[in-house]
Amino acid sequence: MTADIFRFADDLGPAKIVHIYKPSVNLKAIVVVDNVAAGPAIGGTRMAPDVSVEECFRLARAMTFKNAAAGLAHGGGKSVISADPAMLADQKEETIRAFASAIVDITDYIAGPDMGTDESAMAWIQDEIGRSVGLPRELGGIPLDEIGATGFGLAVAAEVAQDFCDLKLDGARIVVQGFGSVGKHAARFLAEKGAVLVGASDSKGATVNQEGMEVADLIAFKDSGKPIAGYPNGKKLKRDDIVGVPCDIWILAARPDVIHADNVDGLDCKIVLQGANIPVTLEAEAALHKRGVLCVPDFIANAGGVICAAVEYHGGAQSSAFAIIEEKLRTNTREVLQAAKDEGLKPREAAIKLADTRVRSAMKLRRWG
Ligand code: NAD
């Protein structure tokens, strides 16, 4: 049988691709459960108008690798709902609740927040089927964006990465592309380690000051709803001109594929720290590697959020989430960067090798692989 639906299949997965269609509530969704050898799959529920099976599969596979590299008792999966996330609140709740009831029997998939969904959406799913992560504090959740779980992990990864290039975090100049939940907390935790923020951007523009900017002040400015380019203690730049700002650590915390063949030569830094998912094309990553710029791959560096979600799922507290993120990010980043150095690989190649080995080891321990 070589039906088209098996076009993504390899020996890791996907275990299931489920299409959901409920015309009465205009619900169109896809769930991909990629690999569950280590345990039930955790992965976000994305709501966007332009989602596809292929994107859902790619994101699910990324979660398989991320969860395996982080040593979680969870496989990888993802779901996408084809809809405009800016729809009216009542309609959004109805859509999410309908989605939840449709996935009740997909017991090896645990939904989490992603683009277009948040902790309220996870609360509705929990209410319908008793299975989700990234819940509000009132329901026993650990609000991972509010506490900065992913940004905290990025700062730990940077601390390890400094040993693999000629850099000291204390005094290192950092630039953050995408000063949102991930980016601003990364800047905050790195500033606590002595780093100096010299540039930041959001979707509308950028601000730069080579003398350094007060991170708490810039966060307060951004949280007041103003575009970052208007920050009074920095020089205003066009959004994409942030790429040319010289620094030691360039942090990506915005969107996929923002560094590509056409702009990679503009980056002037020693470390590229990948907070967003797939933010650098493979071609651009190869060019950076050739120039001796150290890229810490996304699914190693940005695992803080999913580690926090897994701690919540297993009933852990916020304090233990931070301790576990610190321990896992420190160990995994060092293992990947050391293997890359010893074996002459790009960090991403070493990271995939590590994750792939862990998935296959888990598969050997299961009856059906
Ligand atoms: P967010 O919406 O809170 O912040 C994103 C920020 O990026 C916003 O300030 C937005 O204005 C800005 N932005 C958007 N497009 C931009 C562009 N082209 N140039 C510069 N800035 C731009 O989102 P987030 O939760 O911080 O997530 C950021 C990225 O990290 C996403 O790709 C997400 O998938 C990924 N990620 C998030 C987490 C998490 O814990 N939240 C974990 C892993 C990966």
Image: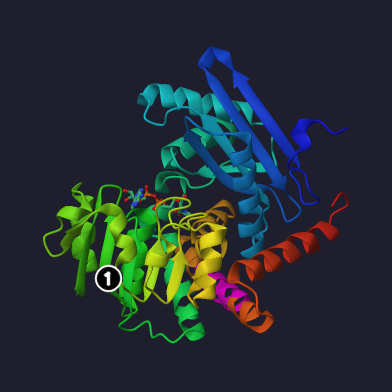
Kindly tell me whether residue 303 is visible in this rendering: no
141 vs 146, nearest the viewer: 146
| Residue 194: image location, x then y, percent | 31, 80
Front one among 205 and 163: 205
Whether residue 192 sits left or right of residue 296 in the image: it is left
Element assignment for label 1: strand
Name the image quarter holding residue 289: bottom right
Q: Nearer the viewer, residue 91 or 138?
A: 91
Image height check: is 254 above or below 170?
above
Which residue was labeled with disc 1? 197
Q: Position of residue 54 (x, y in %)?
A: 63, 39
Residue 93 location (% of width, % of height) = 44, 27
Q: Residue at x 57, y 78 (%)?
A: 334
Asked if 287 appears above or below 102 in the picture, the reply is: below
Secondary structure mostly taken by the magenta-highlighted segment of the chain: helix
Crowding near the residue tagged with mark 1, few <14, some 14–19, many ≥20 C-alpha atoms within 10 Å: many
Residue at 81 percent of width and 51 percent of height? 11
Three-letter amino acid code at the position of disc 1? Leu
Q: Where the N terminus falls, by quadrant?
A: top right
Query: Eyeballing the image, is 19 above or below 342?
Result: above
Q: How is the image coloured?
A: rainbow
Which residue ends up furthest to the top in the rendered image? Answer: 24
> Percent position (x, y) of residue 323?
50, 71
Left or right, 333 with reference to 147: right
* Bounds of the magenta segment: 324-336
Residue depicted at 66% across the width and 27% down the height: 19
Q: Does 206 appear in magenta? A: no
Which residue is drawn at the image coordinates 45% and 44% (left, top)? 139
